[in-house]
Amino acid sequence: MAYPLPKFHFQIEWGAARIGFTEATGLDKQIEVIEYREGSSPNYNKVKLPGLHKFSNITLKRGIMKEDYKDFFLWINDINLRG
């Protein structure tokens, strides 16, 4: 089913399901910085190294169409049973 273009700005796909949403937030990633200075280094400066990756929670708003309910709720139930 094709959704009207003006209504949805983001499309999410998993498996065969495609759902359009009007708003998607939290699509970012942060990488912690580790500052390190080797003990035997003659220089008095630190080296910056990449550390752990941190992802935000994704929020999708206003996008479920009647035809998509079954696949969407099966997916949510599957995730909840794993956790």
Image (cartoon, rainbow, N blue to C red):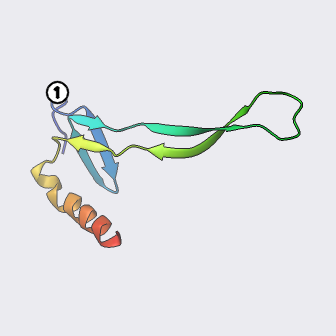
Q: Where is residue 34 in the image (x, y as percent from the top left)?
A: 64, 39
Q: Is residue 19 above or below residue 70?
A: above
Q: Say which quarter of the image contains residue 35.
A: top right
**Residue drawn at (29%, 40%) of the image:** 11
Viewer-closest of 35 and 82: 35
Viewer-closest of 18 and 42: 42
Q: Say which quarter of the image contains residue 45.
A: top right
Q: What element carries label 1?
A: loop
- Mark 1 residue crowding within 10 angstroms, few (<14) / some (14–19) / many (20+): few
**Residue drawn at (27%, 48%) of the image:** 18
Residue type (three-letter) at the residue carrying disc 1: Pro
Q: In this view, does 53 lie to the left or right of 56?
A: right
Q: Mark 1 points at which residue?
A: 6
Q: In this view, does 44 lie to the left or right of 29?
A: right
Q: Is residue 74 left or right of residue 37?
A: left
Q: Is residue 81 left or right of residue 44?
A: left
Q: Position of residue 67 (x, y in %)?
A: 13, 54
Q: Position of residue 27 (x, y in %)?
A: 38, 38
**Residue drawn at (32%, 44%) of the image:** 58
User: Which quadrant holds the C terminus?
Assistant: bottom left
Q: Say which quarter of the image contains residue 44.
A: top right
User: Which quadrant holds the N terminus?
Assistant: top left
Q: Position of residue 7 (x, y in %)?
A: 15, 31
